[in-house]
């Protein structure tokens, strides 16, 4: 009897073209150097293969079910896309410090819909603006740093695509010796089933300091969409950046992002990420400690539910002596969700007195959920202290019983346990209102609300 042969789906590329790059650059009247940079990135993009499960970094991430017919075209072009600041959830529009507002940039789809900046920041010479404006008004600064030494187009096909077709972005620059008086806040909000390509570039000169919150949000829509993003953090000598990156995409969103920091001598980076939404998340997060005495801390909380999939790939690269890195990633999983954390600490030859640590903790709340935890060390120096820890287990029934025996309903008992589990990461967020919103996200997840 004849049998039907099953044909495997291919890892297809989104239906974009060189003409899209040329049209995007022409529409915004971009300078020659940026147009040339985009086209060179497109040529690289076309020469690179799509990542597949044959690649080690993607071995556990199969995204072949994405529908590029909806998720692979650019957002609809119009004056402002019918988008307004009020479309963004109210909590994300609130000032970070009570009534005090530093700088807020808000985008709906790829349109800038709101920009407010406190006079004190302008007086300090701090630049917080959208990337298109920065290209026009601060072209030399942008050209020096944009995808030149943090996220570079040759990393993989998605990085090259962002370099060729980024549609909107944020540029932050803090001059030498300036400690920004107020924080920066940016929002990417997406309401279309399309491909949006956001880019963030932060540059801190020697001795500079700023706190920065970025949020990526969307409602859940009825067809696939994609976010192909890049974040570049350049921390100068003795500079200090506290960066919080939160995402709560709808359950239709596929995210493919590269996020990388370069930290110079005695620089400090405190980086917190929160992952709540999305259908499939593949995020590369990397800290390069390039300078002697540099310090980097990476913290994350993630809480997938339903059939969400999150693959978080981290690297702590010690490229100089007397550097310190510390990583803590904590996740809670519900329903049939799945997470992958792949972490690597690297110490290059000559990176003596390196102190690197990474820990991943996962709490499982369902028999169908699965968390893969893969720590790693690659040490090429002989005077270092590099360690890792990993643990995955179910929520403790004994602890739930203890709380219920004292009159606390099971739902509330689970919430108390999950809250306590996330506290070590939440305490690293420098904004009280944001910590409160993250706890609200957690409660919403526990209640099964999308």
Image (spheres, grey):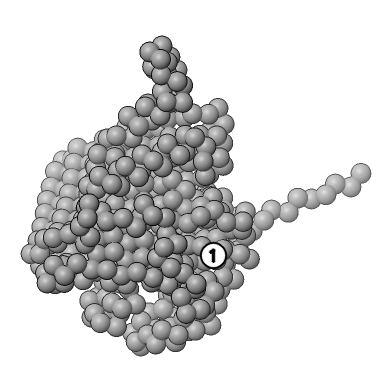
Residue 384 rendering spot, x and y as whole percentages: 18, 40
Q: Give the SS element for disc 1.
A: loop
Residue at image x 92%, y 44%? 1
Residue at image x 43%, y 45%? 276
Numbered marks: total: 1
442 w.r.t. 251: above or below? above
Residue 217 rendering spot, x and y as whole percentages: 43, 56
Query: In the image, is 239 to the left or to the right of 110?
Result: left
Residue 81 rendering spot, x and y as whole percentages: 49, 73
Question: Is residue 314 in view from this perspective?
Answer: no
> Of residues 300 and 358, which is closer to you in this image?
300
Query: In the image, is 181 to the left or to the right of 17?
Result: left
Which residue is the site of mark 1?
192
Residue 179 rendering spot, x and y as whole percentages: 11, 60
Residue density around tag 1, few if under 14, some if 14–19, many if 20 or more, within 10 Å? many
> Of residues 198 and 157, which is closer to you in this image?
198
Question: Is residue 76 in view from this perspective?
Answer: yes
Residue at image x 29%, y 52%? 244
Query: In the image, is 101 to the left or to the right of 265?
Result: right
Residue at image x 26%, y 50%? 271
Name the outermost residue toward the right.
1
Name the outermost residue toward the left.
177
> Of residues 261 and 76, which is closer to you in this image?
76
Image-quadrant location for residue 89:
bottom left
> Of residues 52 and 150, which is closer to you in this image?
150
Image-quadrant location for residue 394:
top left
């Amino acid at each position: 009897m004849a049998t039907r042969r099953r044909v495997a789906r291919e890892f297809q590329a989104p239906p974009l073209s060189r003409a899209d790059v040329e049209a995007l650059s022409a529409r915004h009247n971009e300078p020659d150097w940026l147009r040339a940079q985009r086209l060179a990135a497109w040529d690289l993009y076309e020469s690179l293969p799509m990542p597949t499960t044959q690649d080690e970094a993607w071995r556990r991430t199969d995204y072949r079910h994405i529908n590029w017919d909806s998720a692979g075209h650019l957002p609809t072009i119009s004056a402002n896309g019918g988008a307004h600041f009020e479309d963004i959830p109210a909590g994300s529009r609130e000032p970070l410090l009570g009534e005090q507002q530093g700088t807020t940039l808000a985008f709906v789809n790829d349109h800038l819909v709101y920009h407010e900046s406190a006079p004190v920041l302008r007086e300090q010479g701090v630049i917080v603006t959208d990337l298109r404006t920065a290209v026009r008004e601060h072209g030399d600064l942008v050209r020096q740093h944009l995808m030149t030494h943090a996220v570079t187009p040759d990393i993989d096909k998605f990085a090259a695509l962002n370099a060729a077709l980024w549609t909107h972005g944020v540029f932050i620059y803090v001059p030498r010796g300036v400690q920004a008086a107020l924080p920066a806040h940016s929002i990417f909000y997406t309401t279309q089933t399309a491909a949006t390509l956001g880019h963030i570039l932060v540059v801190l000169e020697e001795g500079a300091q700023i706190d920065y919150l970025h949020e990526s949000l969307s409602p859940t829509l009825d067809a696939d969409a994609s976010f192909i993003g890049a974040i570049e953090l350049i921390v100068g000598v003795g500079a200090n950046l506290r960066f919080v990156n939160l995402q709560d995409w709808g359950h239709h969103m596929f995210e493919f992002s590269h996020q990388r920091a370069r930290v110079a001598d005695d620089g400090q980076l405190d980086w917190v990420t929160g992952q709540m939404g999305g259908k499939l998340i593949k995020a590369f997060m990397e800290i390069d400690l390039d300078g002697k005495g540099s310090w980097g801390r990476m913290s994350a909380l993630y809480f997938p539910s339903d059939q969400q999939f999150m693959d978080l790939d981290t690297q702590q690269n010690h490229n100089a002596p007397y550097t310190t890195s510390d990583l803590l990633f904590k996740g809670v999983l519900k329903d049939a969700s799945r997470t992958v954390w792949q972490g690597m600490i690297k110490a290059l030859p000559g990176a003596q007195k390196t102190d690197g640590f990474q820990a991943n903790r996962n709490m499982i709340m369902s028999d169908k959920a699965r968390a893969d935890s893969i720590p790693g060390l690659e040490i090429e120096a002989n005077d270092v202290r590099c360690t890792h820890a990993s643990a995955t287990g179910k929520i403790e029934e004994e602890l739930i019983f203890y709380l219920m025996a004292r009159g606390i309903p099971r739902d509330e008992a689970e919430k108390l346990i999950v809250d306590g589990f996330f506290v070590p990461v939440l305490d690293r967020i420098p904004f009280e209102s944001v910590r409160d919103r993250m706890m609200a996200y957690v409660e919403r997840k526990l209640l099964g609300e999308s």
